[in-house]
Image: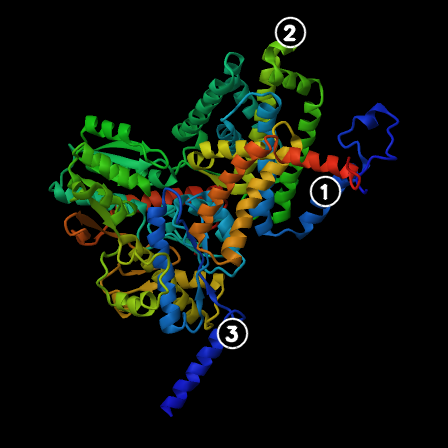
């Protein structure tokens, strides 16, 4: 009734192929962007930013990155935590070596460095597939964490082996350190999230993305029709690692401020991001956002309901949360393997016909 | 007349309790961990911390007439959740944080300084926070990791008759900021005393230590010092027993010296040593009050089965220290409803004497110390305890010894000045 395409005519190819061809969708998208950019920064406080928005935005970037590799190109990766660590340590080394350079540039460069490392660890994907590739990327995860723990150069020889972000600004506004304003860090992360989503969306619907999907669906057939698997797989690793590196840099520099590699970028982080794209939906940009939101918000929501409202002991709520997340993953894998994104698509299909279904 | 007065005070007290939510209360958030691989250490500490404040509320009506509240937030020893907990509790008027996690401490040091909330990290956290001129809001009295390392070496010196130049000492440590803390001190001490130091890292969470103990079996160190936490401790004691390493030459830091760590190994753990910065057992007058006002009233935190254990005592001690600091702050500022900023002044002027400890019902329990703007870390008195597997209790086997300040103070100055120059911090004391 409200959500329909009647009267919505496309007169050019560009109009027909835009991301949101239906007017209602398009306006909803603009409204979300407007609220995120021009309303939230003026009303947020520390709690909302540090507990909800910032982890959501940063995990969304990581999920987009992993989704490109796993969802679009079909290369299973368990090295997300390790690649995030590369981004974090790259940004740390850059921040301390070039204190006067804007944080924007540091974060982007951290992404570029991670892309290089990702390509390196993507090389085995040319020979091995499926579970075996998962194990190879798992090796990357453990090797990278070990490396950052072992070589003091990476953490500037600090006694504790931790890296902590010094105060840095961009355009004169403090972005890292303890004296930042909530709106500044939020906006900084939001800009990177929007940038990542737009780039990822346009890559995946262009020729590069089509090559990735061809490789994912059947690599031999793709090779026969002229897709170069070397280039397709390595570009997927590079682009994916670029986004994951950005998210790692933001995670360390903006969100946490101090990081201990074994704890923060361990194997659990790799699984968490993988769960996000499984629950959210493989091969969907919206799914990356939905999955990240789901796994960031659910624990906070459960905590508020369980501890603050119902007054349950904190340990029971913490255990309950593990049970619920575990159960949900199983439910999704059985009932809706394509995740929240597919539920959203189905809901939209139904809404287009409502109130007159077949 | 007296009855009337009593009735009057009771009425006032009743009014105060009734109006409690509307009134200012003293909030002491507890960033606890009752889940995950470190829960064995987190539960008794959190219980002790909560029980002491329950006692203050029940017996004294809070601190200086203000009721206390201890909102708990589960961190699972995870820094991300720790930050979330900090952000969600600081808005409630939190007076002081005690995260009981070195990782979370590192995270919070810049944040609490910016938010003007003090943080106490007794026997943990960043050691150089002892220098209050650089770390204005962080306190780590009465002892720190480097004191622990130094006293462990002192104990070994005593055992060996003063000469350890031909000895080999292994450090088994949790491969994190926490475990790496003592390395620099031990390196300095090895230069001074001539012993050989072997570093053996164990990765989080430490359930798998076969290769580490194989290395120890091969290297045959004369002593093993351990900086472990959580499940790592139990595994290490068990593995040491498996390779028949002499338990009285195996010394843990105070985080590796609770009942949980030695009980799984049974009789084989007999003689294992651990450091401590406070006394052991439950034979103190305070426990009578805890029994009367808290346990018997059914108000004990958690399952109530942790009383008298090492880490429960440490939780009680930690709560006592901040409660005394709150009293000091109330005296300085002449108001009972103190703010976090006033609480910081209270911590900086805290003076713990034996007379005060005896008055609180903890005679001969902890060291005397006076906090000052320059010294946020106390005097570093540490003792050695030993596990008696038959009696199933820890026994103090040494006096409280002061650490080697000649070695530690220059290291503290060096590390804190590095932090100060990295973060452009002026000397806040002069």
Image side of residue B214 versus residue B429, left or right: left
* Colour setup of the view: rainbow
Label 1 neighbour load within 10 Å: few <14, some 14-19, many 20+: few
2 and 1 marks in contact (CB < 8 Å): no
Identify residue for label 3: B19
**Residue B111 visible from this viewpoint:** no
Question: Looking at the image, is mark 2 or mark 1 earlier in the sequence?
Answer: 1
Pick the front one: B264 or A176: B264
Label 2 neighbour load within 10 Å: few <14, some 14-19, many 20+: few
Q: From mark 3 to mark 1, how far is it between C-alphas?
A: 43 Å
Element on which disc 3 rests: loop
Q: From mark 2 to mark 1, how far is it between C-alphas?
A: 43 Å
Residue at horizontal 36 percent and vertical 44 percent from the top: B38
Q: Position of residue B284 (x, y in %)?
A: 23, 64
Identify residue for label 1: A32
Q: Quadrant of residue B189?
A: top left
Pick the front one: A223 or A123: A223
Element on which disc 2 rests: helix
Q: Residue furthest bottom?
A: B1
Q: Quadrant of residue A266?
A: top left
């Amino acid at each position: 009734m409200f959500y329909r395409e009647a009267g919505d005519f496309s007169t050019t190819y560009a109009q027909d192929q835009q991301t949101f061809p239906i007017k209602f969708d398009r306006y909803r998208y603009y409204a979300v962007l407007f609220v995120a950019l021009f309303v939230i920064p003026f009303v947020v406080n520390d709690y909302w930013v540090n507990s909800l928005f910032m982890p959501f935005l940063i995990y969304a970037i990581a999920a987009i990155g992993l989704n490109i590799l796993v969802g679009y190109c079909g290369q299973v990766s368990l090295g997300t935590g390790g690649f995030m660590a590369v981004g974090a340590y790259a940004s740390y080394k850059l921040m301390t070596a070039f204190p006067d350079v804007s944080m924007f540039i540091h974060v982007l460069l951290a992404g570029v460095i991670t892309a290089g490392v990702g390509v390196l660890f993507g090389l085995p994907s040319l020979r091995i597939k499926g579970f075996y590739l998962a194990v190879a990327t798992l090796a990357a995860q453990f090797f990278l964490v070990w490396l950052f723990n072992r070589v003091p150069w990476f953490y500037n020889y600090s006694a504790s082996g931790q890296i902590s972000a010094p105060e840095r600004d961009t355009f004169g506004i403090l972005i890292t350190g303890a004296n930042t304003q909530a709106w500044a860090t939020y906006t900084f992360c939001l800009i990177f999230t929007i940038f990542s989503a737009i780039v990822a969306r346009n890559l995946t619907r262009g020729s590069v993305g089509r090559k990735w999907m061809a490789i994912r669906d059947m690599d031999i057939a793709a090779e026969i029709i002229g897709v170069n698997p070397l280039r397709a797989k390595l570009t997927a690793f590079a682009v994916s690692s670029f986004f994951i590196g950005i998210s790692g840099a933001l995670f360390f520099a903006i969100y946490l401020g101090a990081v201990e590699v074994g704890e923060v970028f361990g194997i659990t982080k790799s699984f968490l991001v993988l769960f996000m794209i499984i629950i959210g939906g493989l091969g969907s940009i919206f799914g990356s956002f939905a999955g990240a939101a789901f796994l960031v918000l659910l624990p906070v929501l459960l905590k508020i309901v369980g501890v603050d409202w119902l007054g349950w002991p904190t340990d029971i709520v913490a255990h309950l949360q593990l049970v619920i997340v575990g159960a949900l993953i199983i439910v999704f894998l059985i009932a809706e393997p394509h995740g929240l994104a597919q539920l959203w698509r189905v809901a939209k299909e139904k809404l287009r016909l409502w109130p007159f279904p077949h | 007349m007296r009855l009337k007065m009593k009735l009057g005070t009771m009425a006032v007290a009743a009014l105060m309790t009734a109006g409690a939510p509307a009134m200012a209360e003293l909030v002491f958030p507890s960033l606890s961990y009752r889940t995950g691989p470190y829960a064995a250490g987190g539960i008794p500490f959190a219980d002790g911390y909560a029980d002491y404040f329950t006692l203050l509320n029940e017996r004294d009506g809070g601190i200086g007439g203000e009721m206390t509240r201890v909102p708990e937030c589960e961190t699972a020893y995870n820094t991300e959740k720790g930050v979330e907990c900090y952000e969600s509790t600081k808005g409630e008027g939190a007076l002081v944080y005690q995260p009981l996690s070195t990782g979370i401490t590192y995270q919070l040091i810049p944040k609490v300084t910016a938010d003007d909330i003090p943080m106490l990290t007794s026997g943990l956290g960043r050691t150089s926070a002892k220098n209050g001129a650089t770390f204005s809001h962080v306190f780590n009295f009465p002892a720190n990791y480097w004191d622990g390392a130094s006293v462990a070496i002192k104990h070994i010196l005593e055992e060996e008759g003063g000469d350890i130049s031909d000895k080999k000492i292994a450090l088994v440590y949790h491969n994190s900021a926490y475990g790496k803390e003592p390395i620099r001190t031990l390196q300095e001490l090895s230069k001074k005393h001539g012993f050989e130091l072997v570093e053996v890292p164990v990765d989080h969470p430490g359930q798998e230590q076969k290769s580490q103990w194989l290395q120890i079996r091969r290297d045959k160190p004369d002593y093993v010092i351990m900086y472990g936490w959580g499940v790592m401790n139990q595994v290490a004691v068990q593995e040491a027993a498996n390779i028949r390493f002499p338990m009285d030459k195996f010394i843990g830091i105070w985080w590796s010296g609770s009942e949980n760590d030695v009980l799984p190994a049974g009789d084989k753990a007999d003689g294992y040593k651990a450091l401590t910065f406070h006394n052991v057992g439950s034979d103190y007058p305070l426990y009578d009050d805890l029994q009367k006002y808290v346990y018997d009233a059914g108000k004990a935190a958690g399952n109530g089965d942790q009383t008298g254990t090492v880490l429960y005592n440490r939780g009680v001690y930690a709560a006592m220290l901040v409660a005394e600091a709150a009293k000091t702050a109330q005296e300085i500022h002449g108001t009972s409803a103190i703010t976090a900023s006033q609480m910081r002044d209270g911590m900086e002027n805290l003076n713990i004497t034996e007379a005060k400890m005896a008055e609180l019902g903890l005679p001969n329990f902890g060291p005397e110390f006076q906090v000052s703007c320059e010294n946020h870390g106390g005097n570093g008195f540490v003792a050695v305890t030993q596990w008696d597997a038959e009696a199933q209790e820890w026994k103090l086997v040494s006096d409280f010894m002061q650490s080697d300040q000649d070695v530690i103070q220059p290291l503290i100055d060096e590390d804190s000045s590095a932090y100060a120059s990295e973060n452009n911090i002026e000397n806040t004391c002069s």
